[in-house]
Structures are given as structure tokens and as C-alpha cells.
Amino acid sequence: MSSTIYDLPSDVGKTLSELRKIAKKKQADIAASINVAQSHISRIEKEKLTPTSHEIEGYVNAVGTKEAKDYLAFLKPWKILKRPSFRNPQRDELWKAELSLRELQKLISEGAPDFVMRQAHMYQNSVREEAEYLASLEHSIIYTGSIGVGKTTAVGKLTGLTIAQEKQLSRQSVLAVGTGRTTVCEVGIQCKEKFGIRIKPYSLDEINKLLEYLCMDSNSSNEEEQENQQEVVSQEIQRLLFNMAGLKRETFTELAKQHENPDTLLFKFSEMLKLQERSREEIWFDKTSNQTGIEWLKETFRLINYGLHKDFSVPRRIDVMVPDTFFQSSIYDLEIIDTRGLDKDGTAIRRDLMDCLNNQRSLTVLCSRFNDAPGSEIRDLINTLIQNGSEKVLQDRVVILVLPKNDEAYNKTNDAGDLVDSKEEAYNLKREEVQTALQPLLKQIDVKDIPILFFNAHPEQDKPAEIAQALIEKLDKLRLNYVKRLSSTVEAINALIRNQKEHNAQKAYEIVSNQLKIFLDRWQGKPLYFGRIHDKLLIPEMRKTHAGTVRATTRRNGTLDKFDVYLLLGNGSKSVAWNTTMPIFHELKGILQNLIGDSLVKEYADNFVNEVLSNWDEWHQEFLTYSEQIGEQIFKGTLIKSDIWKECANIKGPGFRDEVISKLKRWFISTEQQHLHDLLNKRIEEAWQEKVFGKLNNLIGNVSTEK
């Protein structure tokens, strides 16, 4: 017999072991049943030995449960789709998708009619994309919010990263907490076998650039220039660098007086950091330590976060690894991310945040203080998502978490001016306030509301497990949308195979195709004007951003993390593209929805119409994503090298921000840059025709528009 007739996943031994334990069987029971030594079973379960087909079947029969027999069927080869994990809750739906694709491939290979082939290719692509999403169990829960709202404290509580015996809340947290600007960078929390920390460090060139900015104005007595220095290099990074060098701000000032030449100061400062000795990027808990794992984690995180660990350099990101017992029980492979806080006088449109929001596998938790919820930063972020067509993000992947501190909730008054009788009453009143505040924004789109949760991190207040469970349920709903879409596409495939030779099916397809052709004839090739993207987002965001931040970004040629000019241009491009194409987008949706009222279409092409509707959404989002990317790329190459930044950085005195805005506006509207606007319009227009109309056109056969 061959070693195995099954297509074995890498975790076959682990899964067999879990099935045995659930059935309350011993290794000796399995060994006796298939006539091998117990040590042989142990080696299989530890994945040191690959079982044969006979051993797998004998093992499963010895376990004897339905789940074990399901696993045997699960091991049959998957020919088209990637095999999911056996613990994947959608494995049955994915197997149905696998079988439907096999039938569809057979249909295509047999030379199906043109109208069948056109639908088949669309369905095939859809199933592959939906199945790829569901096959993975990896998801992220990402926390963001203004500096000082209590976000990191909440993250620590919700993930179990606390030391319970500490009485003060601030001392309980394993992560660094304070009044704000405490954590030096983004922090990820991941499930591993033991406690550990891994960093992604800044490169040497990046660190030298930070040092240059610190040293550049070190001897200046000008308060404005000192403020600019602090904006370029964040307070957290400055603190870390001073600690790495064994300095305090006062001693750094003295050092600067001793080295009046910035280059000499830079060399001395860099030498004191001993970067050549700081090459370590990960560290793991040693069980021989006098500390418990959680105590070691807290102390090691503190040392790295404050620049006090002699082996670690400047972290761009810190990943904290904890055993799975610290995560809320979940089938998902979760990563928790605590982002850097948002500045109240800055923009919420930051690259790390936009990447999180655009990640289809992530749930973003917008954290807000209780008294001012939802907060201007959250409103601005939601408004940006609405303006650039990210309705699905708000609908499926965003939650608002309001964080009361101390007795804030109990000090809430009702409409009669009376203090609330309970925490629950306060939460309900605040929830209504937040919903009312967001309603003017949400009424622009088809989103009724955004889930609002409340969590007071103080002991004896709110239960972390309830919030964690609510977030897991939100992830469940997110995946359920993909399950529904996958099931719908599989049903469409089955209907296509079932009705491929039906004359009425072709007739119904032609009715739909006729309407699509009429729509395309009206819009395809019609030029669209997308306008000047800098006025959409960049200039308005610059007007409300602190002047020190604006000066800092001019000194970085527009590339400051907290105010990235090119990111804002890209988002402005996406917003312009959405507002220009939105009427066309909604027009086709209306046409398709009306078509379902036709009796023939309803009976024979209902699935087809629904699939076109779903794909129309996807194609439009792909177009918007491209518009964002190309908007950033086209202007960046020219603008980042422009002398405009040097001119802006040299502006002195009051009115600095307004003067920078005026100079940038003149740069964008100058005749020298007109070719960039023309190129952007051309590229977006081409993408609209190719990525949206082109795919729609592929669904139309040789149909006539005559009635």
C-alpha cells in the first residue's frame, strides 16, 4: 500500500490528537486498535512521523466519533481551492465551493455556449476570491483613538495583559500606560507558545535622520524652532533616544553647548547610542527566571519602550507574544494592534490607520473619551471614509468603543437634569448622543449606525470578556457576509449548470445583457472630469493642523508620519474619483434591481443579476483603490524633489501655515504642473473604462438593443 492516498495537511498529527482527547481515548487505545506501539502513535501526534492511509483510517475508526469520520472525509484531496483548517467553521461551505468549481471547469472544457461561458468566468473568479478569504482564520482587531483617551489601558485589560495583584490600575498594565505619549510606537499582541517580544527597528539611516533633526536646532534660543524640532521627532522618540544615550533633556542641552557645530554634536550623540551593540530584534522568557512570565514581559517591555534595554535599538513596531491562554477563547488566529494615538490638532488620515481600515481582515475599534464621545477625530475619520466611498468599511469593519474613567458615567445627567440611577442608564444616554452626532454623516450612505460599546477598565466596573466577545461576534458577522456571498455564487453556478440548455435561460440572459449594453452605450467612452485633488483633502486638513506639524512636514519634504502630504493627495484622488462616478455606480444598481421584477429574469437569471450586483461593488472598489494609489504616485515624484519645501521651511514669523498653504496652492495650479493633473485624469479615466466598464462589457454577448 502507498504511504497515503490522502492529501495530508501539516497539522494532521495535532488534529488526530485533539480528536482522540475529545473522545476521551488514550494513545494506548488507538495503538491496540491498529496494532502498533504506543510510541508510534505518540510520534504521529507530535508530527515526527507521517501516518499511512491504513494508520489514518484505523486511528479514526478507533476514535469512533462523527467528527473523526468527518475528518477522514476532509482529508480527500482538494484539487482547486486551498484546503482550510479542519477547525475552520466554513469548511463545509468551502468544500461545496470546491465541488461546484470542479463541475464548472468540466462545463467550460466541454465548450459551453457563449452566454454560459461569460457567466462561468465571472463566477469562477468570485468563488476563488471568496474562498481565499474564508480559508484563512487570521484576523486583526485594531485599536485607535486620540492621545490620552485610555486606549492602551483598555487593550491591556481586554487582552489579559495585566498583573492582578497590583492595586493601582496604571501599575496593573503590562503595556506602558500614562496620560498619553507613553508607548513609543505601534504595538502588536500575538499568540505564541510562550512569552516573548520582537521589534521591527528603524534603519540606521532613519535613526541618523532623527538625530539630525534633534541636533539641528539644539542650540537655538528661538522657541518656534525648538517647537518645530519636537514636531519632527516625537516626544516619545526623543525620550527613548536620550535614554539610549544616557542623557536627560537638560544634559543634552549642555552637550549641545559643548558642540556648537551640529555635525560634531550629531557624531557625539550617535556615538553615545552605541547602535552597533543594539542589534537584537527578539527576546524570549526563560523559565529559570525569578520572575513570572507576565512580570518578565512587563519589565522587558518597559526597558525596550523607554530605550533602557542595552541590546535593542529604536523600535518602529513592538510585537508582544503571549501564550494562547491570554486571548479570549476564539477559533480565529487573532492579532491585537494598539496604534499610536491621534493628535487632537492634527489629521486622522495617517498611513498606518488607513492601512488598517482598508484591510479586509481587520476590525478597527475607534476609542473615545466618555464625556466628548464620539470626538472630533473620530467624526473626521468617519467623514473621510464616507467621502471616499468606503461605505463597506463603516458597515462591516468599524466599532466605536467609549471609555469612561472613574465615575464619569455616574455623573451623567438625563434630560430632566437629574443624575442617572445606574451605569446602564448613562451608557444608553451616551449611546443616543453618539448616534445623534453621527447621524448627519451616516445619512449620506446606506449605513444605519455603527456599533457602540462601553468599557470602564477599573476593577468591578465592566467585564473584559463581554467586550471581547462582542468584538469576536463582529468578526463572525464580517465572515458571514463572505459566507452568504460564497453560497450565493455557488447557487448561481448550480443554476447555470442546471439551465445551460434551457432556451428561456438564454432569453433571460439576453434581457439582462441588453440593459447592460444600453447602459454601457450611454456611459462608455464618455469623458469624466475628476478635478484638482489637492483641494479635496490636503488643503482642508492642513488648515486645521498645528503650525508646528506643518513646518515639520515641510522639513521632511512632505513625508512626516503624522502629516503625509502624499497620502492626503492619494485619499483626495480616491474621494474625487468616488464623487465623480457615484451617480453612474448607483444608476446601474437601480437598473439591475429593477430587472429582477421581470418574470423571466426572476426565474432564470435572478442569480446572474445578483452576481453582477456583487461584482459591480467589487469592481468599483478596485477602481477607487487604484485612483488612490495613482493619485499619490503621480504627484510624489515631482513634488518631493521640488524647491517648494525649502521655500516653505524658510518662512518665519506668524502666519506660517497660511503662507505654506498659499505657496502649495500656487504650485498645484501653476502651468508647470498642469501635465500632472492631465496625466492623473487620463490614468483614472483609463482605469474606469478598464477596471469597471471593461469587466461589465465582458458579460455581454452579441446582443441587440432593439425592443
Image: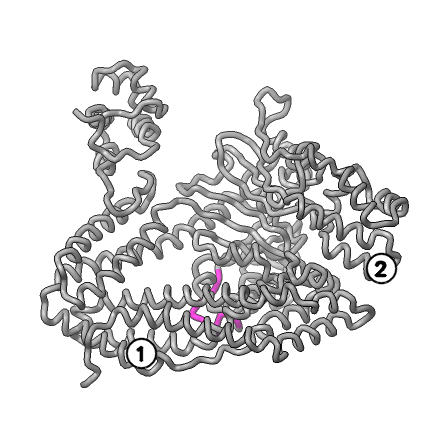
Note whether 26 is above or below 193 in the view shown.
above
State the residue at coordinates (28%, 33%): 8
Q: Position of residue 203 (x, y in %)?
A: 64, 44
Q: Earlier in the sequence, mark 2 or mark 1?
A: 2
Quarter residue 254 falls in? top right
- Residue identified by numbered label 2: 223
Note whether 565 is above or below 666 in the view shown.
above
Q: Position of residue 559 (x, y in %)?
A: 64, 59
Asked whether, in this view, residue 200 is left or right of residue 647, the answer is left
Q: Position of residue 420 (x, y in %)?
A: 61, 58
State the residue at coordinates (57%, 68%): 635
Dot 1 falls on a residue whose secondary structure is helix
Span highlighted in magenta in the image? 441-450
State the residue at coordinates (82%, 50%): 262
- Residue identified by numbered label 1: 520
Which residue, as the protein is rendered here, is positioned at the far bottom?
707
